[in-house]
Amino acid sequence: MPWCPSCDRFLSPPTVTAEGTCPKCGRAVEPGRAHTSAPAAKPHPEEELPPVPRHLKVLGAAMVVYLGYRFLQGIEWVVHRF
């Protein structure tokens, strides 16, 4: 979010001028992580996501095993019911 330190407020990215200045006071704004629409502005490279923690992988695998077991129980119940 672009921030204007002299006006002490956040600006929406479309309101920042092409030169990267505040439309109200005309001073340079701190770009933060916002993408500006200015052609001279270089986009930020995509940040690499951290790896998925091991405990979430184990939890996901346990959930798949549990739901698979419950699915088989449901199939067995339907077969014996009719």
Image (cartoon, grey):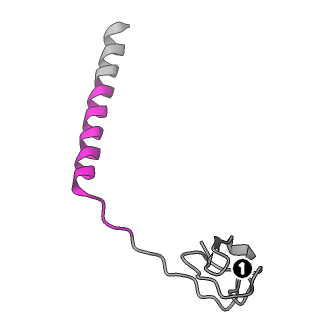
Residue 79 percent location from the top left of the image: 34, 14
60 in magenta: yes
Choose top left, top right, bottom left or bottom right for residue 15: bottom right
Camera-side residue of 60 and 76: 60
Residue 2 percent location from the top left of the image: 62, 76
Choose top left, top right, bottom left or bottom right for residue 4: bottom right
Up-down relation of residue 7 to residue 63 (above or below): below
Q: Residues within 10 Å of mark 1 (few under 14, many from 20)?
A: many
Residue pictured at 36% horizontal, 14% vertical: 78
Residue 18 percent location from the top left of the image: 73, 87
Camera-side residue of 82 and 24: 24
Residue pictured at 29% horizontal, 39% vertical: 63
Residue pictured at 57% horizontal, 83% vertical: 43
Name the outermost residue toward the top.
82
Camera-side residue of 1 and 44: 1
Q: Main secondary structure of the magenta part?
A: helix
Q: Secondary structure at mark 1?
A: loop
Q: Quadrant of the N terminus?
A: bottom right
- Residue under circle 1? 16
Name the outermost residue toward the right.
24
52 in magenta: yes
Horizontal arrangement in the rendering, residue 14 relative to residue 62 (left or right) = right
The range drawn in magenta is 49-72
Residue 14 percent location from the top left of the image: 73, 74
Choose top left, top right, bottom left or bottom right for residue 37: bottom right
- Mark 1 belongs to which amino acid? Val
